[in-house]
Image (cartoon, helix red, strand yellow):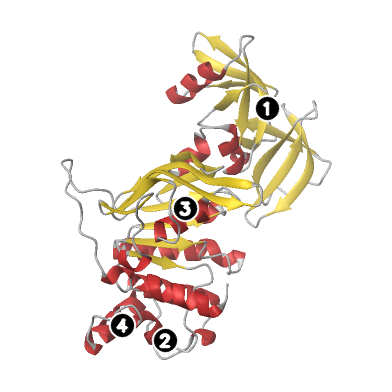
Amino acid sequence: MRDDVISTTAANIITAAAMPIRPATRHDGSPPALRVADLSVSFDTDTGRLQVLKQLDFSLARGEIGCLLGGSGCGKTTALRAIAGFIRPDLGSIEVDGHCVSSSAKVLAPEKRGVGVVFQDYALFPHLDVAGNIAFGLRRMSAAQKREQVAQMLDLVGLTGTAERFPHELSGGQQQRIALARALAPSPSILLLDEPFSNLDPDLRETLALELRDILKRHGTTALLVTHDQYEAFALADSIGVMEDGRIAQWDEAYRLYHHPASRSVADFVGMGVFLPGRLIEGEQGPSVSVELGSLPIDQAEDRIEARKNVGRSGELTVLLRPDDVVHDDASPIMASVVRKAFRGAQFLYTLELPSGQRLLALVPSHHDHRVGEAIGIRFAADHIVTFAAD
């Protein structure tokens, strides 16, 4: 996209919160800050009509930070653009503070829906200094009010003293914060974040995501992030929707996505792990799963329900093992050979091979430095036994 197009788009969206939306009346209290209901979007292609979003449905409460997480082509960016007002949906609706801003019948202009956007490349205006960028959407304020709001925003993002600097004089992380300050300055109802860390060094992303979360929480902002990076999503969001083929496969907290994935595809996308064949055993003390590592008791009630639902006629099912489920233990009789090792500072990520040839992953403290080819003792330790139907 050309710089002039980016600037025009940014100029339109930055002024969004200057036109607040009046909430609709509801009998069950205040409406959610954002409601996306049965949203479907399709585009014309050379081979016909391509449906990108398929009855997308989720909501965010006031002050909640949500995330649409998924790989390339899953529809997350299309969803963000539809919420911002750049795309008309085929079906469904989008509500901001209880007021419909998009449907198949109408699309409220981006600058009229109370939505702010932090663009992937920040879209800062190069000819304006930091103060000018932040104040750009504050057209209804007096000069004194603008100066006060700019000072408050710079204090919020931790960049006091940079008001007279220009974007090219700032680091990538500082530019990201200025873009955030500019988007927050008009107090939008919803803040949309389009892969805001993709242009930053990997080492900075998680740190800045945590800092950004603190800023949004202090400001009380409702926000929606789209990203392909699960660690950014985990660091920033309260609720995460894992998207697959235009739909949300699971909308949940990060902990539950990791420990209670709704499907094998979600389990495969969120975190690392391997799938082992197992057999469900019903005993006097409750059910357990027999795998090559031994017998794994299923202690959690939710895990028991899932295992009994997933088990086949002959008792077979599939067990998910995360790297943190496998513990290095020299006293264990179960041995596995180190096939690969990746140093991660405080830990090694070992790829281990069992006698059967089945491989699994283990996170081991970095002072346990074993050679490739060496056999080490391991045992299973997990609070959650995640199972799926057998292959």
- Of the two numbered discs 3 and 1 in the rendering, the one whose residue sits closer to the viewer: 3
Q: Which amino acid type corresponds to the residue marked 2 in the rendered image?
A: Thr
Q: Secondary structure at mark 1?
A: strand
| Up/down of 264 relative to 317, above or below | below
| Coordinates of residue 37 in the picture (x, y in percent) | 37, 43
- For the residues labelled 3 and 1, the Cα–Cα distance comes to 35 Å
Q: Compare marks 2 and 4 and give the one earlier in the sequence.
A: 4
Going from the N terminus, do you reach mark 2 or mark 1 first? 2
Question: Which residue is identified by label 3?
Answer: 79
Where is residue 83? Give x, y as percent: 40, 56
Q: Which residue is mark 1?
A: 276
Mark number, residue 364: none
Which residue is depicted at the point 24% across and 48% down?
Answer: 31
Mark 4 residue element: helix
Report the quarter where the C terminus lies.
top right
Of the pair 185 and 218, the residue shown nearer to us: 185
Report if the CB atoms under discs 4 and 1 are less than 8 Å apart. no
Q: Is residue 177 visible?
A: no
Vertical relation: 96 (above or below) 159: above
Q: Does residue 280 appear left or right of residue 353 in this picture?
A: left
**Which callout, 4 or 1, points at the residue further toward the start of the chain?**
4
What residue would you read off at disc 2?
162
Q: In this view of the protein, which residue sits in the foreground, 365 or 7?
A: 7
